[in-house]
């Protein structure tokens, strides 16, 4: 009986894991360049989910969704959400992080925690004014599911996985092949040398935030389609877990973030499904967050460089 | 010399302070429920701190305001005493976190876990909850046990601090922040679910009725008594803070905060020093947790969320991390703001709404603005006042002053040799 649900559990885990992976990319990109944990990244994801849902709700009430191909509608939503969250990320960097670039390491972190809480309440605020509630139901664009023989995967889950893979490939190509990508890698390696090579460091950092945040926002749209309900607090825990994924894979390493995300999603889904039955109900699915955090702590203790990262010696 | 420069800076004249105390005390006495009067009397403590008199006079004045004037003027007013003891609880917690964040520079986002440990320690054993897993029907304990449990809470939380610290403190900087955040959540989830397989915490239902403290048969359940209990705990914590600040351990904390590698190469054991900071901060939170449980008479896991940790962090950062007067100010300000000012403001808006002047959706109730306000405060402080409202004063090791002191002969090691070398 336990094995019967295994394929379904794996499919759920993959869907979740790919979302973690894309959000983890945002953490890892910023960390790679600034060595700073962008605490507000989870909230950018949440804003993306709200923007996507609002776009769908508004166009639905205007009747624009009637007869429109769901894939086209989804694509447009995604583009709008990515543009807005990308802009938001750049704005946050400009206002709350850039003035603190030379400050002691904890100061920008404190500012980032502040941004994170501010965004949660601002979204709640706006939704409270606009709709008088802040738990939103996202209109579902896709129904039905694709049968894979032993497991069936819902179309929306399938789209999540495909889009996540597309975004990852696009990002990898961008970082490795384009001029801007090379500039980003150069800044990550050595800011001052990069600036001597006529690279505009400020612009590169802005670009990093733009890309990382728009990926986060896009994941928000995927999340809202996949799970159907959102609230202003979804970003916090998901952000924390995506960060865990980034650490698991080796923070600063793009490939690591992708693998770490998928791995964490699978582990979480498996533990959620099997911990209860295996311990006779003593420790059930309510402990799955504990499980994820324990992984974070274990990785930081025993392999702080992560699966793919390089161990860094501290320089004096 | 630096010392003289500081001393010649004029503070506030004593007369002004005395008049202020008299006026705000009168206001407190004659007004039934006024936040402004309460803020006035709190502000007098800050005035005293900056008054241009002898340190001893300032101490006596401060003690007089806290121990005599406030209880005499407002002691029979439940409202004021309630606010005052609430402020006190947060001041005590913020002072505990100040050791971890301010002195040792360890950003702990799961501090409330230790508070929860203390609160649950008292709650479980002072109610019949403990009968669920300890046979013999020994429980509930009476309110007399509150006093020993202050120590028990301290020890339990300190042990928690060491147990959490041992794995957590191997990571540093911003990683530490995330890991402590994770641990704080883990503890809350565990407390929330530990009603099975063995019912230890009663899960989300929480534990009630937690007995009020009792002393010689006097039941001390009113805010009036809690005001004094909290005040004495604060005095104890403040003294501990001051004693720690310039002790060997305190200086080791600062060294670790400023530069771990340099501190290590000076022979400071990183893990031990950080563990000491963690355990000390935790133990204060544990004591306050016991008081909190006794004061609320009911606790459940929702009192120990991440928001609480962040709130206490805001108090420390806003006031000035590492600065004892700053942290007290920050804690008092944030507490009054969130328990009183926001509530008053939303009451005011509600009254406007009832008279039909404005239309206010329920979600916009100002008393729900915690996150917004904390967020803005954190950003603004980080951007414009990273050292807080009252920045920590670094003790200047003035070489001349050390040489001139009576200890210059023997105890100062290399310094004394320097002096002798010059003299001969």
Image (cartoon, helix red, strand yellow):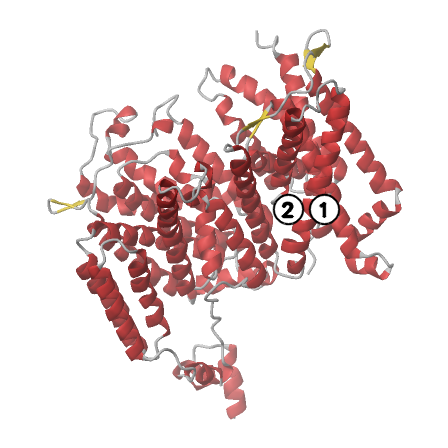
**Mark 2 or mark 1, earlier in chain:** 2
For mark 2, name the chain.
A
Side (left or right) of A220 relative to B39: right
Q: Is residue A278 above or below residue B172?
A: above
Q: Residues within 10 Å of mark 2 (few under 14, many from 20)?
A: many
- Residue B226: x and y in percent read 24, 50
| Residue denoted by label 2 | A38
Residue positioned most to the bottom: B424
On the question of residue B212 being in view, the answer is yes
> Circle 1 — which element?
helix
Give the mark toward the camera: 2 or 1. Answer: 1
Side (left or right) of A90 relative to B6: right
- Residue B192: x and y in percent read 41, 30
- Residue A294: x and y in percent read 55, 34
| Residue denoted by label 1 | A209
Instruction: Find out whether the residues at labels 2 and 1 contact each other: C-beta distance under 8 Å.
Output: yes
């Amino acid at each position: 009986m336990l094995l019967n649900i295994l394929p379904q559990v794996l499919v759920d885990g993959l869907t979740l894991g790919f979302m973690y992976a894309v959000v983890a990319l945002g953490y890892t990109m910023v960390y790679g360049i600034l060595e700073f944990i962008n605490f507000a990244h989870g909230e950018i994801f949440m804003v993306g989910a709200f923007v996507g849902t609002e776009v769908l709700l508004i166009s639905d009430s205007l009747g624009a969704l009637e007869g429109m191909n769901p894939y086209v509608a989804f694509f447009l939503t995604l583009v709008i959400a990515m543009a807005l969250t990308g802009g938001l990320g750049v704005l946050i960097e400009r206002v709350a992080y850039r003035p603190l670039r030379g400050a002691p390491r904890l100061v920008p972190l404190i500012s980032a925690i502040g941004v994170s809480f501010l965004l949660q309440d601002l979204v709640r605020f706006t939704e409270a004014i606009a709709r008088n509630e802040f738990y939103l139901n996202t209109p579902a664009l896709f129904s039905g599911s694709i049968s894979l023989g032993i497991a069936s995967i819902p179309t929306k889950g399938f789209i999540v996985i495909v889009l996540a893979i597309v975004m990852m490939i696009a990002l990898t190509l961008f970082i490795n092949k384009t001029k801007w990508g090379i500039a980003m890698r150069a800044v990550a390696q050595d800011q001052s040398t990069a600036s001597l090579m006529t690279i505009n460091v400020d612009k590169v950092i802005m670009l990093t935030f733009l890309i990382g945040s728009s990926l986060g926002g896009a994941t928000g749209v995927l999340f809202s389609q996949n799970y159907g309900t959102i609230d202003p607090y979804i970003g916090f825990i998901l952000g924390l877990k995506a960060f865990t994924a980034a650490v698991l894979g080796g923070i600063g390493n793009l490939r690591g973030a992708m693998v770490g995300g998928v791995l964490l999603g699978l582990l979480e889904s498996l533990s959620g499904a099997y911990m209860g039955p295996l311990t006779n109900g003593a420790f059930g699915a309510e402990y799955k967050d504990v499980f994820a955090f324990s992984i974070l702590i274990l990785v930081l203790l025993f392999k702080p460089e992560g699966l793919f990262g390089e161990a860094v010696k501290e320089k004096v | 010399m630096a010392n003289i420069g500081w001393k010649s800076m004029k503070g506030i004249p004593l007369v002004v302070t005395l008049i202020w105390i008299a006026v705000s005390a009168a206001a407190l006495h004659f007004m039934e429920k006024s936040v402004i009067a309460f803020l006035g009397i709190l502000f007098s403590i800050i005035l005293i701190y900056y008054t241009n008199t002898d340190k001893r006079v300032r101490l006596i004045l401060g003690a007089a305001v806290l121990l005599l004037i406030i209880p005499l003027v407002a002691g029979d007013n439940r409202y004021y005493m309630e606010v005052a003891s609430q402020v006190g609880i947060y001041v005590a917690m913020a002072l505990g976190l100040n050791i971890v964040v301010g002195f040792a520079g360890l950003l702990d986002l799961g501090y409330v876990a230790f508070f929860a440990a203390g609160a649950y320690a008292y709650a479980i054993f002072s109610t019949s909850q403990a009968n669920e897993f300890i046979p013999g029907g020994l429980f509930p304990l009476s309110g007399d046990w509150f006093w020993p449990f202050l120590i028990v809470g301290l020890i339990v939380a300190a042990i928690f601090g060491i147990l959490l610290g041992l794995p957590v403190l191997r990571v540093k900087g911003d990683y530490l922040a995330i890991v402590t955040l994770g641990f704080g959540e883990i503890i809350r989830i565990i407390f929330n679910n530990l009603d099975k397989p063995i019912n230890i915490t009663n899960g989300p239902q929480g534990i009630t009725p937690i007995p009020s403290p009792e002393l010689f048969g006097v039941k001390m359940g009113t805010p009036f008594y809690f005001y004094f209990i909290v005040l004495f705990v604060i005095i104890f914590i403040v003294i501990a803070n001051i004693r720690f600040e310039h002790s060997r351990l305190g200086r080791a904390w600062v060294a670790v905060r400023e530069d771990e590698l340099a501190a290590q190469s000076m022979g400071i054991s990183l893990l031990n020093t950080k563990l000491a900071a963690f355990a000390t901060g935790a133990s204060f939170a544990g004591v306050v947790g016991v008081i909190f449980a006794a004061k609320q008479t009911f606790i459940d896991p929702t009192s120990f969320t991440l928001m609480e940790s962040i709130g206490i962090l805001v108090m420390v950062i806003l006031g000035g991390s590492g600065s004892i007067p700053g942290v007290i100010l920050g804690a008092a300000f944030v507490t009054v703001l969130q328990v009183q000012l926001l509530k008053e403001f939303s009451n005011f808006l509600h009254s406007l709404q009832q008279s039909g002047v404005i239309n206010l959706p329920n979600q916009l109730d100002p008393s729900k603005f915690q996150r917004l306000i904390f967020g803005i405060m954190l950003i603004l402080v980080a951007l414009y006042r990273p050292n807080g409202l009252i920045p920590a004063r670094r003790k200047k090791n003035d070489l001349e002053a050390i040489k001139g002191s009576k200890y210059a002969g023997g105890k100062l090691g290399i310094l004394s040799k320097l002096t002798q070398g010059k003299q001969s």
